[in-house]
Image (cartoon, rainbow, N blue to C red):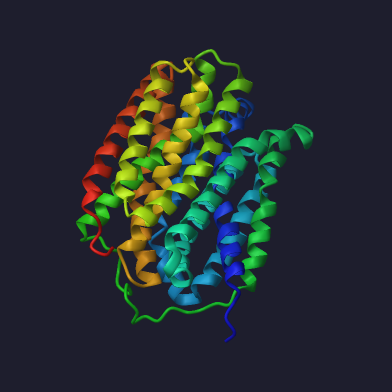
Amino acid sequence: MKPFPRVMLLLALILAAINLRPGITSLAPLIERIATELALSRSLISLTTALPVLCMGLLAPFAPRLALRIGLERTIALCMGVIALALLLRLLGHASEILIGSAVLLGAAIAVTGPLLSGFIKRHFAGRMGSVVGWYSLSMAIGGASGAVLTVPATQLLGDEWTQGLAIWTLPALLGLLLWLCLPNRLEGDGSEGAGGLPWRQPRAWLISAFFAIQAGLFYALATWSVARYHEAGLSLMHSNSLFSVSMLMGLPSSFLLPWLAQRFQNRYLLLVGCGLLSTVSLAMITFQPTVLPEVWALSIGFGLGGTFALSLVLPLYEAGSPLAVSRWTAMMLCVGYSIGCLTPVLTGLARDLAGNYQVPFVALTGLAVLMTVLAWMMRRGPRAS
């Protein structure tokens, strides 16, 4: 078989990664409006964020099994189609059942795609994993930032109809589907390394998964409620949305730069600790002094959390040898991480309803950032494979 052009493989990875976040982050700028129009409580509307994340956790272990049956590339193509369908269904989002159902469908597709993209990197880019993971995480950050920044303008251009603003993200998903259908599919042999189950008995796998759970929970809690926190503190809705957009955009340079630095200087755990400290300080300021230099802390929280996510994607790549084994380590990380992390936006919304303000749940988020930093320090001894 003639080798497929490497640039097309990288482009396919980038397009798939771009489509993993807009379906979630596009809701944040509109969440208060949607909750009001549909008469939903904050804890219930937060399910539109929490359910995809829960699915991303619970269904991640099925990704390697699907890849064994139909091939890694075809499985990812199938997921691109499901993402497109879920986003298209948001045209009917005035029915809350369909809006929440689309979130479940979206999460299921993302759950399977994530672990397999790590295996795809291991298969095709083994010699350049740091730089390729940089492109991968940068693309996810671009997708997340685009969902946060462009959804409101798109909604306004489409007659101020928020269902159409949410459904516009079907288009890049369809583009990703078309490209992945063009890629040659390769079945993974059952006898390859990693053909067993997930590494549940590996203490290090649990440590990595716990770290990922906290960083994911912090990201999705902020993606859901940071605009509301700023607005409650007295900032205008436009200013609050701009701060959220700034934090999303600031994840772009850290998503690309930090994996490259981690591979070049072999200091990924020191970088994880630094990003954890930066996130902790930023969250503390957003919690206790949200109107003091808010742009600075929006920039720093975006850089810090973008960095923790990008670096966490690198970790499974150094823990296993084969693409399928890497997919299994990643599947466990995502399974544990997202299953726990999905609770954070719901509990944040529930705590806001009970306490009457956002400061109380944001104190808890700051505490989680401290714990995340401690876990990063505990991982510094390095993996069994360098």
Q: Residue furthest front?
A: 265
Q: Residue furthest bottom?
A: 1
Q: Position of residue 370 (x, y in %)?
A: 29, 32
Q: Nearer the viewer, residue 290 or 126?
A: 126
* Figure quadrant of the N terminus: bottom right
Q: Position of residue 147 (x, y in %)?
A: 61, 41
Do we see residue 57 in this rendering?
Answer: no
Q: Is residue 379 left or right of residue 357?
A: left
User: Which quadrant of the view contains residue 96?
Assistant: top right
Q: Position of residue 32 (x, y in %)?
A: 58, 26
Q: Residue furthest top?
A: 234
Q: Residue at x 67, y 54 (%)?
A: 172
Q: Nearer the viewer, residue 181 or 273?
A: 273
Q: Residue at x 32, y 62 (%)?
A: 318
Q: How many marks?
A: 0
Residue 57 versus residue 189 in the image, above or below: above
Q: Nearer the viewer, residue 107 or 370?
A: 370
Q: Nearer the viewer, residue 229 or 373?
A: 373
Q: Residue at x 62, y 42 (%)?
A: 146
* Figure quadrant of the C terminus: bottom left
Q: Is residue 65 left or right of residue 102?
A: left
Residue 116 versus residue 343 in the image, above or below: below
User: Which quadrant of the view contains residue 79?
Assistant: bottom right
Do we see residue 235 in this rendering?
Answer: yes
Q: Position of residue 284 (x, y in %)?
A: 37, 23
Residue 276 versus residue 324 in the image, above or below: above
Q: Is residue 352 left or right of residue 199?
A: right
